[in-house]
Amino acid sequence: MPSPLQKRSLVDIALEQIHLRIDDGTWPLGQRLPPEPELAESLGISRNTVREAVRVLTFSGVLEVRQGDGTYVRACANPLDTMLVLARSSVEQALEARGIIEVEASRLAAERRSEADLAALREALEASAVHHGGVLDEYIAHDLAFHQRVVDSAHNPVLSELYRYFSQVIRAGLERTIGDPSRPQPSFELHRELVDAIARGDADAAAKANRALLI
């Protein structure tokens, strides 16, 4: 029976082989992996080792196991590595990336939002307004919840997941920008303008309002 060290080494090999196939496009984003017996045979590794590697990659967010359907590629990079890159980004870099996601999401939200989306947006906006000018941490939490609603109203699960994944970096950036009296602060009314533009389906106005919020 292999020792824990040997087993760990075999799992590492399995992880490396799966990552290589994802990276080289053999298994692209959204692809279903071969069944476990076939996967084990193609990797030349036991089914127990493959099962453990899949468990590790599922935990880290690279793979997704859908009961009764199979195992799918959920991310093309290890989210833990990605978070390290995001954590090292500057405020300016974070704002640029935030703008790319949010401005386009605002356009799409104006075109795709439902009445339920509008109700949720207005509810989130009022919750944010209550905390505006108050305790910074509480306002930032509600502000992020509002902007997540905007992104979700675009009805693009990729954008929603990206923004949710990026939220912790955005939070750190907001703590530095909102808490810095030397930086110009956008008017809270721009949030209302954004919601109004989305409500009337004006994609250009929605994008303009969101862009102005990212000064």
Image (tube, rainbow, N blue to C red):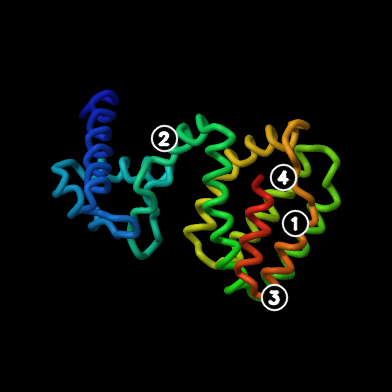
- Which of disc 4 and disc 2 is earlier in sequence? 2
Numbered label attached to residue 200: 3
Q: Secondary structure at mark 1?
A: helix
Classify mark 3: residues with Cα within 10 Å, few (<14), some (14-19) or many (20+).
few
Task: Say which amino acid is labelled 1.
Answer: Leu
Numbered label attached to residue 190: 1
Q: Position of residue 194 (x, y in %)?
A: 70, 62
Task: Say which amino acid is labelled 4.
Answer: Ala
Classify mark 4: residues with Cα within 10 Å, few (<14), some (14-19) or many (20+).
some
User: Which of the two residues, 73 or 8, is positioned nearer the viewer here?
Assistant: 73
The answer for how far apart the CA atoms under marks 4 and 1 are is 18 Å
Q: Nearer the viewer, mark 3 or mark 2?
A: 3
- Which of disc 1 and disc 4 is earlier in sequence? 4
The answer to the question of whether label 3 and label 2 lie on touching residues, with beta carbons closer than 8 A, is no
Q: Is residue 66 left or right of residue 136?
A: left
Numbered label attached to residue 141: 4
Q: Secondary structure at mark 3?
A: loop
The answer for how far apart the CA atoms under marks 4 and 3 are is 27 Å
- Which of disc 2 and disc 3 is earlier in sequence? 2
- Which of disc 3 and disc 4 is earlier in sequence? 4
Q: Nearer the viewer, mark 4 or mark 3?
A: 3
The answer for how far apart the CA atoms under marks 1 and 3 are is 15 Å
Task: Say which amino acid is labelled 2.
Answer: Asp
